[in-house]
Image (cartoon, rainbow, N blue to C red):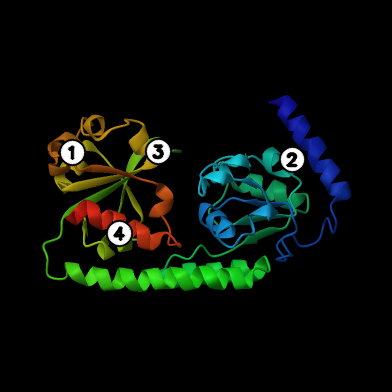
Amino acid sequence: MQVMRSSLAVILCTMLVHAPGAGAAADADPPPGDHVVCVSKQINEFIFAIGAQDHLVARDLTSIYPPEIQKLTSVGYHRALSAEGIVSMRPSVLLNDGNLGPNEVVDRVRLVGVPIVTMDPGKSLDGAEDLMTKLGAYFAREREAAAVLAKWKAGMEATFAAAKNWDGQKKLKVMFMHFGQIGNTYLGLSNEGPAVQILQWAGGENAMSGNGRMTRLTPELIAAAAPDIIIATDVGFDRYGSPERFAEMPGINLTPAGRNLRIYRIDETEIMYFGPRTPASVAKIARWLHGE
């Protein structure tokens, strides 16, 4: 631990001496430069979508799409970042969506004069589209962002049209199960956030009730919710590796989804925020609910 602190101190001192404008306001929204550390899976995906990925030098652990981003150095889980890891990349900016920490790490990064730029992650579809536009302007890729948006909006129009097919039909109850890596526990996605809206467009009903984004799941809560279908995000599903093994978890074995092995795997990045892949994600879930 002492060696790590000493190494960090050396890096911090070096950057304080050489960082242009060190001591100035760190959050002045500077131009991105060519050494961007981005700790937002949504922003990282959008950066690749507009062809600005050459600016990136590092990512957070959960930024895994598109697959080629995994070639970049990881500076850790976005809520458990390493100051030494970030500073060692000599970033021109730390780009994020506000969901990062711990605070002391952010303070250390700010201390050396690294600008910290926060962009709203777009909790609504309109907000996500605005984020794409802002990133296009930030990286001087306006035309590319406009082209991505045009295709994305066309896909959403088709999604809205298809969603009318489910009007008046009985809706299957779906439980989204997400594995929380910090708490090492399974969480059910509640009635807020993109996943539930995506599910509604696909013609399903959320098996979870209550407000907030996530609820810690217990066997009793899972059994009481009685989902017809379970959709598990990648990390949580992969701990078991198959619907058969997943269905053996306490509580799940008592649900219609568990008994009928209607358990599906989805990448977290497909449902935790809106993006250009949203139309395809809605179509995928609709196939699971309604068949081909």
Q: CA distance from mark 1 to mark 3?
A: 19 Å
Q: Are marks 1 and 3 in contact (CB under 8 Å)?
A: no
Q: What is the crowding at mark 2: few (fewer than 14 residues within 10 Å), some, or many (at least 20)?
A: some
Q: Is residue 94 left or right of residue 21?
A: left
Rendered image: mark on residue 283: 4
Secondary structure, mark 1, is: loop
Figure quadrant of residue 74: top right
Given this view, does label 2 or label 3 mark the residue nearer the observer? 3
Residue indicated by mark 3: 235
- Mark 1 or mark 3, earlier in chain: 3
Q: Are marks 2 and 3 in contact (CB under 8 Å)?
A: no
Rendered image: mark on residue 88: 2
Residue indicated by mark 1: 261
Q: CA distance from mark 2 to mark 3?
A: 28 Å
Q: CA distance from mark 3 to mark 4?
A: 22 Å
The three-letter code of the residue at mark 4 reads: Ala
The three-letter code of the residue at mark 2 reads: Ser
Given this view, does label 1 or label 4 mark the residue nearer the observer? 4
- Mark 2 or mark 1, earlier in chain: 2
Given this view, does label 3 or label 4 mark the residue nearer the observer? 4
Quadrant holding the C terminus: bottom left
